[in-house]
Image (cartoon, helix red, strand yellow):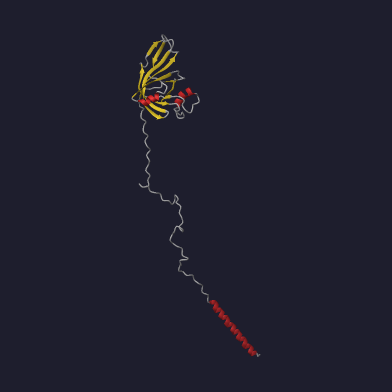
Amino acid sequence: MSTKRLITIALSLILAFALTACGDSDNSASPTPISTPDATPSTENTPDATPTPENTPSVTPTPENTPEATPTPENTPTPTEEPTPTPAAPLDDEELEALFSQLPSKYYFKSVDDGWETHLNLLPAYKNGTLSFFLGNQEEVDASDKGSGYSRGTQYECWFSGKFTDVKRINEFEYSMKVDGFNISGTPGEIVKQYNMRFITLAEPNGFTGEDEFRLYLPGRSTHDLPEAFLELVVKPNAGDEIPAELPFVGLYNTSGEIGFAPED
């Protein structure tokens, strides 16, 4: 083959190669279109905007997010009024007789420190709801106080009488009652000499002032809330130093004078 022919073939190959390279360059400069997603929402990928019990979160009420209820006549509770206890009615004559007929009639209080005694005698007579009569006396003897005509000493005394009225039942073991018609026999300060003694009338007996309120305690009454004065002056001297859980005997207690009486029987 001649040199001219070779040069012609070589030029043809170079030209073909150049044209091929230009074609590839044009193809790479034209980008391949990228698919754009459809902007129109579809029912498949669009969330349901309408709340339902299934997709609505539950909100737990707290003090911060719970509105305070404004009181209205409809939601304001009506206060409940406590019933007023009915006052106990005084015992009638039949009830009084049934009560006192089973109780001791004689009671006493003795002061260990001062040496005086007060005695009380209940008389079983009932009229218009009243224990019609009681008698009593207080005695205190001072053997060192003696002189002409009273060598045996001096006795201070007070004889009195009255009645218990307005007797009311507080509970099974306790009654209240008031003193009425209180009277002292003799003149306070009066002096009488007889039996080789001097007797002086006191203005009033210990345990009574004339306008007193008493409590009647029956056996079985709990001692845990009895007045301290009654426990010290009546229960301990008659039941021992150790106070029992329940009162073992009948007792009378003057709430005004804080003096108590135990039965003599």
Horizontal side of residue 24 vs 73, given as left or right: right
Q: Give coordinates of residue 61: x percent, y percent.
A: 44, 51
Residue 159: name its quadrant.
top left
Q: Give the left or right position of residue 234, taking residue 184 as reference.
A: right
Q: Is residue 29 visible?
A: yes
Image quarter where the N terminus lies is bottom right
Q: Is residue 39 above or below residue 6?
A: above
Looking at the rendered structure, the number of numbered marks drawn on it comes to 0
Is 225 in front, or is 27? 225
Q: Position of residue 259 (x, y in %)?
A: 42, 23
Spot the residue most to the left: 128
Q: Nearer the viewer, residue 68 or 54?
A: 54
Q: Spot the residue most to the top.
A: 148
- Residue 106 x/y as whole percent: 42, 20
Q: Residue furthest right?
A: 1
Q: Foreground: 192 or 109? A: 109
Q: What is the x, y in percent for residue 72?
A: 36, 47
Residue at 40%, 27% in the rendered image = 175
- Relative to 6, say whether 178 is above or below: above
- At a point 58% along the width and 81% down the height, the residue shown is 20
Which part of the image, by quadrant, shows the C terminus? top left
Q: Nearer the viewer, residue 225 or 133?
A: 133
Please name the residue shown 42% across and 14% down the image.
155
Q: Is residue 212 visible?
A: no
> Image quadrant of residue 256?
top left
